[in-house]
Image (cartoon, rainbow, N blue to C red):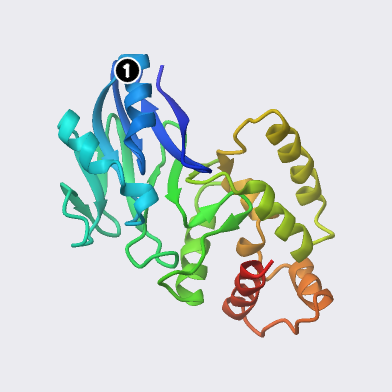
Amino acid sequence: MAAIEPLRAFSDNYIWLFDDGAGSAFVVDPGDPEPVRTALEARGLALEAILVTHHHFDHVGGVEALKAETGCTVYGPDNPGLPFIDRRLRDGDAVTVLGLAFEVLTVPGHTLDHIAYFAASPNPVLFCGDTLFAGGCGRLFEGTPAMMHASLQRLAGLPAETAVYCAHEYTQANLAFASAAEPANAALAARVAEVRERRERDEPTVPSSIALERETNPFLRPDADGILAGLSAAGQTPAADSVGRFAQLRAWKDGF
């Protein structure tokens, strides 16, 4: 049976491993090759592909070594700074990898080259790198607030049941900020308690779901009454539009 599991890397990265149940695998954003090697050997899997979401080293640092060792195909953004990409992807491209039919979504903001991979069936899954996090979103290293807001709203429009596979274990810190930004959100309070219990057991808090992010992630909710109240309580006058309020939230989080 096919399965997706996290491989821990560095201090808080997740490399996602897809096992097709028939001896083949792909991985997403292998910043470190060693956890991938260990998992492939332990499970007797052949690495057929690597999916890359963006160019940051903690997402691509292991790609060249794994490609040289396995001959796998590397999919990724159309960024000339990534010479190891075999299949350069743009918005709307369709690629099938080990039976999963992905639509490629460009989601700039964290970086300008950032892409995400969405498969609608058999169960909807999203590999979104550092764009959408559980309870948060990536910092704006290269893009603008308008870019990131548009990218996040695009992801928020995916089916509610979509499993969200992000690339870092940032959930507790993200939810601490979310609780400051929207303190009256009951669904958020319940999520905080659940995440605390998971982390006490040293369990991953991801994947999340689009439905849960819509309910509890402040960066998907800049128009919610609770967010406007939270900004006001923090001494900020809420901006007049969604992009402006998103920018306020991101700047607040950057210094939180």
Residue found 30% across the figure and 41% down from its top:
62
Indicate the position of residue 155 as horizontal and vertical percent values: 49, 56
The answer to whether residue 157 is left or right of residue 118 is right
Q: Which residue is mark 1?
A: 41
Q: Secondary structure at mark 1?
A: helix
On the rendered image, what quadrant is the N terminus found in?
top left
In the image, 28 versus 185, the foreground residue is 28
Amino acid type, callout 1? Glu
On the rendered image, what quadrant is the C terminus found in?
bottom right
The image quadrant of residue 37 is: top left
Can residue 236 be seen? yes
Indicate the position of residue 144 as horizontal and vertical percent values: 46, 76
The image shows residue 253, relative to residue 169, as above or below, that is below
The image shows residue 253, relative to residue 131, as above or below, that is below
The image quadrant of residue 55 is: bottom left
The answer to whether residue 49 is left or right of residue 117 is left
